Amino acid sequence: MSRSITLGQYLPGESLIHRLNPRFKILALLIILVLLFSLQTFGGLAVLLFFALLVFAVAKVPYRFLLQGLRPVFFIALFALVIYFFFTSGGVVLLRIGFVTVESEGVREGIFIVARLVILVMFSLLVTLTTTPLSLTHGMGFFLKPLSYVGMPTEEVAMIMAVALRFIPTLMEESQRLMRAQVARGADFETGSIFKKAKSLVPLIVPLFVSAFRRADELALAMEARGYMIGARRTRLHEDIITARDWIALTFVMVLLVIALTFGI
Amino acid sequence: MFIGTEKLTHTYMSGTPYAKEALRNITFSFEKGDFALIIGPSGSGKSTLIQHLNGLLRPSSGRVFFDHEAIGSDKHKLLQIRRRIGLVFQMPEEQFFSETVFDEIAFAPRNLGLEERLVRNRVNDALHKVDLDAGTFAGRHPFQLSAGQKRLVAIAAVLSLEPEVLILDEPTAGLDSAGRRTLFNLLTNLNRNERLTVIISTHHLDEVAALAGPVLVLKDGRLVMNGLAADIFIRRSELDELGLALPPVTEIMHNLFEAGLPVNMAVYSLTGAKEEIMKLKRRRD
């Protein structure tokens, strides 16, 4: 049921990739993004695809999770392929069905775009699979920092994100428990028209809201009791250590980008 | 075998690194009319076991029985089973969503598709069974009630299914001692007078030690003891190791016995203890 929703899909591990600094991972992801969009040849994409698979192997993420993560992209990819195949002209006509033609340029571009998309998703998956949601938000908070000069409360935004992420699994668990509890009272969430289904969600949503508000209230009190204050400077329990490994990884990705740009691969 | 399991094993999130075996190889059975206990420290698998008994969770391996039949995956049959086995979750008042106590209790019978007239009868019966006056309580908002009253309404909301078996997961959690006593008196009466099979999970022995039915003791998902209350509550040191403390009175009787005094250790109330000690004193004199 809700097990298919992979929010906070972190897979615990001890690999080299897991231990990289989250800020560096985010930065490396951005560079790879730029690299992906500056690549012009299939050869370049193939190298990057190979690199992605290599990193997956190093991170010891089972390929099952890779396929699972790619599933949502499948339809977008299919859609893009169809559009490119039939609506891009140029090159040799490969296929003619009545008025529509499939031309070689369209096939080439379609496959190129889809490959790009798949590789992009693969690298993003790598980051989310090997980084805890919490350190991911801390990492993002770091990049938001410059915005505090134009008056954005970046510390608070990062805190809101961290709290929201923290409570997703809790709320999921709670909604499952509630669902079972109401099923035990004869509720039926599965059959009936859309209207009936929507109505059957009331016994689920009302208690969920009640408990979410109660939780929020308790959390606010607990945070205040521990001295949390908006605007105050906070220190962190887990220091954000940057090691040589992080610099090596980042430099490596940078070198890839420079090579691709200078040689026009 | 009225209700029970055979080699039941349950693994949460199997096939992922988060996989956790919650129950392992559990076999037991309770009979019709029993007042049964499932005890164990928190995290021992009590809630998981309970949710198997009316088919809310499916076993990873093994089988669950009800009324001499294995619980299958047939939807229609599962629905029938859930009508016959009422399950009250932990902190059941957190499920409330209606604006009146009446609607809250009527949820289950309405789901059964009963006529409104019959629904009203069921609600009144259920309120009567938990000793709440229908005239006073039916129209109230559930959130206006006291903790103890909320719990009773939550139980009534399951009793309105008119189940043959009532299972309660930690029914006394968060109640004060008066609330706990009311609840236990009520459950014993339902068991005795309405011939309702009652199954309770708990980790507080002092409130259930005086009961006489079958008892299961769970630890880390395994069944470590299975027997009648009288035979289990005598095993103090083993229970102690599981972090399950007997009532203070019983502890004292055990200590007296170990000090060499011929007293009955299966004493769960002050009055009983007093009698035992007086008996001892008379014998001395």
Image (spheres, coloured by chain):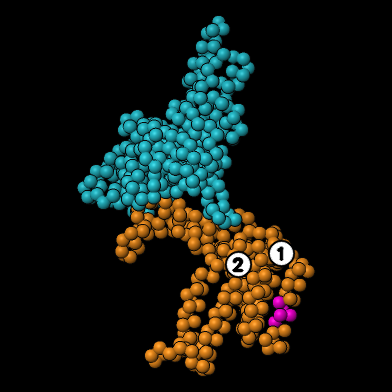
Local secondary structure at mark 1: helix
The subunit carrying tag 2 is A
Local secondary structure at mark 2: helix
| Residue B78 visible in this rendered orientation of the protein | yes
Number of disc labels: 2
The answer to whether A236 appears left or right of B269 in the picture is right
Tell me if mark 1 has few (under 14), some (14-19) or many (20+) residues whose alpha carbon lies within 10 angstroms of its own. Answer: some
Among the chains pictured, the one given cyan colouring is B
Q: Which mark is residue A128?
A: 2
Residue numbers of the magenta segment: A253-258
* Amino acid at pointer 1: Leu
* Amino acid at pointer 2: Thr
| Residue B249 visible in this rendered orientation of the protein | no
> Can you say whether B68 is above or below A41 in the image?
above
Residue beneath disc 1: A16
> Can you say whether B232 is above or below B202 in the image?
above
